[in-house]
Amino acid sequence: MRAVKLMGWQALFIVVLLSVTYHFTFTQGQDYDFEADKKKAAAPPPEENNCNGIFLSYVFISREKEFPHLKNATAQAWAFKSVATILNAGEKDLKAWKMYIGFQHKEILVSAGGAVVMDGDDLPAFVGNGTYLSGYPQADLKTSIETAGDLTQIQAEIQLEGTQFGLKPPAVPMPKTIKLVNDGFKCPAATRKGSSMYVCCVTDPKFKANITKTKYMPRQNGDLTIIYDVLQAFEGNYLAQVTMDNNHALGRLDHWNLTWEWMNGEFIYSMRGAYTHKRDYSECIYGPAGKYYKDMDFTPVMNCEKKPVIADLPPDRKDDEKIGKLPYCCKNGTLVPTTMDPSKARAIFQLQVFKTPPNMNRTAFFPPQKWKINGVLNPDYKCAPPIRVMPTQFPDTSGLDAFSTAVASWQVVCNITRPKEKASRCCVSFSAFYNDSVIPCNTCACGCKDTDTCNQNASPLLLPPEALLVPFINREEKAKAWAKMKHRSVPKVLPCGDNCGVSMNWHINSDYRKGWTARVTLFNWEDINFEDWFAAIEMKVAYPGYENIYSFNATKLPQVKNTIFFQGLEGLAYLMGEVNGTNPLTDPRVPGKQQSVISFRKKHTPGINIVKGDGFPSKVYFNGEECSLPKVFPTGAAHRSHVNLLPILFLTIITFVLMMDHLR
């Protein structure tokens, strides 16, 4: 009987054990299936498996209504989240990948994890017309072959967050397109499926690439190139050198300011050949640097800002033992074209950079991102992110026929952008001997801040010639009086001024059978002087007939189409700033001024028509900045230079004689 009871308890124990085991196994099986379902749901489109190139995708995740909540759907702001992915499914490494996303719903990008905006704009940035992104910190994508399919090395994922407007749900705010913009690739139209978009970009067989046997990207050409060289590397810090080269025939910078953004807590301990505008070490003391460098005296530190603003040293510091003694330094921030002075087309400075954990290894280098550079009344430059290039070679300091190389090098390429309408920094007025009115600079040519008392969209009023010599604020009465004299209507709200710091008047001086002349006058309405100024004009029709310019040095630029370059003569290279009149209480301020006559021959330009506009420039530059041009030319109703008066006089006399004879 006891044995039977024991067997009963044993059977019961086995049943319970089997039940628990079965339940545990069933539960584990459920978990496994759930994970498989997740992976299956997140599986990439089948087109990815068929891509033998670079596969790009964009997936819209979600959006939420932002404040204020509006009834107008097109004005309503929405916070969106999306993910862009770029996968190297090809056979070659993808260096410095660049991706375009064609946003189209007035998007404002707030964050982009895993990438930076290529034009260096700070976030948040308006990207409603599309934007270019490049990888950071993962700029290069290796192949699946060399990494055994490791997604962390062959794929980059960009987490995007921002604001978009309009498109009331259930509509999905997708971009127009996505594509790879690296050289040597071509992308078909992107395919959209619901809230996702993808495209496979393949190598372009027609593209002829520069064959390099190194693992680095070839150096690029640009209007302004910047090289960031690591010269010496230590545990926790390194010495870097920045070299800037002006490569554009009309590019220029005056009093340049260079800025970038440190991405890993670095700070500038010291500099040679340049300095930072702000010298505040508080950010080091209260930041990650202060926690790590507990015993460091931060008072000698040059700059601890995440975004330092760097400027060139003045010439009197060139031979300073501590901060000078570098070639091409200390020119007060002047970078001119090589056509003017090759020695002033380059700038160099050095900086000692300290790092913070976890990047303390002597081989860990992260160049700064988001480079920007600007000057005073100079063109705008847009800079691409730095790309790793072959280390720079330097001549050996011993004088031997040898060279040394940098530890690591990166290149930043900056290109000049054409100013938008009403955003120039200089402007041009037109006049001619056959019309007594001057066509002034465009309204708001260089922007308008206060438009409450003037009309920023109205055409400018014609002026008498003497009005060019007074500031715009003093031209109002002259313009109204001139309009009244010429019987022209005057609007109740007058047009706004041009608000430009520098202007040029182009005046057709004469027009005769074998040639013609123009008078060029530069006006400086700024308080500063322009040293070593230059200007350039593009003459589409008249260029072949250029003969001479008499009070400036001038030359034709073969590298810029139909362009004549001129600058002040030796000793006259200063365009002085605006000064007070003879009586400051009553007289208007007087601009700095330089003037010359330029002559052209008609032998090489048959059929040229000065009155119809062939005698006016199609583009004008001052110190590299493209100036705003009038939209009309002076009319030539009174122009009679081509009319020979002798035949007319002869016909008049004959007619008079015949009439008298008839009366007899």
Image (tube, rainbow, N blue to C red):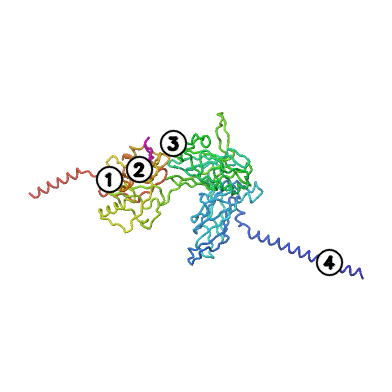
Secondary structure of residue under mark 4: helix
Residue at the spot of label 4: 13
Q: Nearer the viewer, mark 3 or mark 4?
A: 3
Secondary structure of residue under mark 3: loop
Which of the two labelled residues, at mark 2 and mark 4, occupies the earlier sequence position? 4
Task: Residue 433: give its label.
Answer: 1
Q: Residues within 10 Å of mark 1 (few under 14, many from 20)?
A: some
What's the amino acid at mark 2?
Gly
Which of the two labelled residues, at mark 3 and mark 4, occupies the earlier sequence position? 4
Identify which residue, 600 or 255, lies in the foreground: 255
Task: Residue 592: give its label.
Answer: 2
Q: Distance of mark 2 from mark 4, alpha carbons? A: 106 Å
Looking at the image, which residue is at 64% across and 43% down? 361
Residue at the spot of label 3: 341
> Which of the 4 quarters of the picture holds residue 553?
top left
Q: Residue furthest top?
A: 400
Q: Distance of mark 1 from mark 2, alpha carbons? A: 24 Å
Looking at the image, which residue is at 92% across and 71% down? 1
Identify which residue, 216 or 245, lies in the foreground: 245
Which of the two labelled residues, at mark 1 and mark 2, occupies the earlier sequence position? 1
Residue 422 in sight here: yes
Q: Is residue 41 above or below residue 307?
A: below
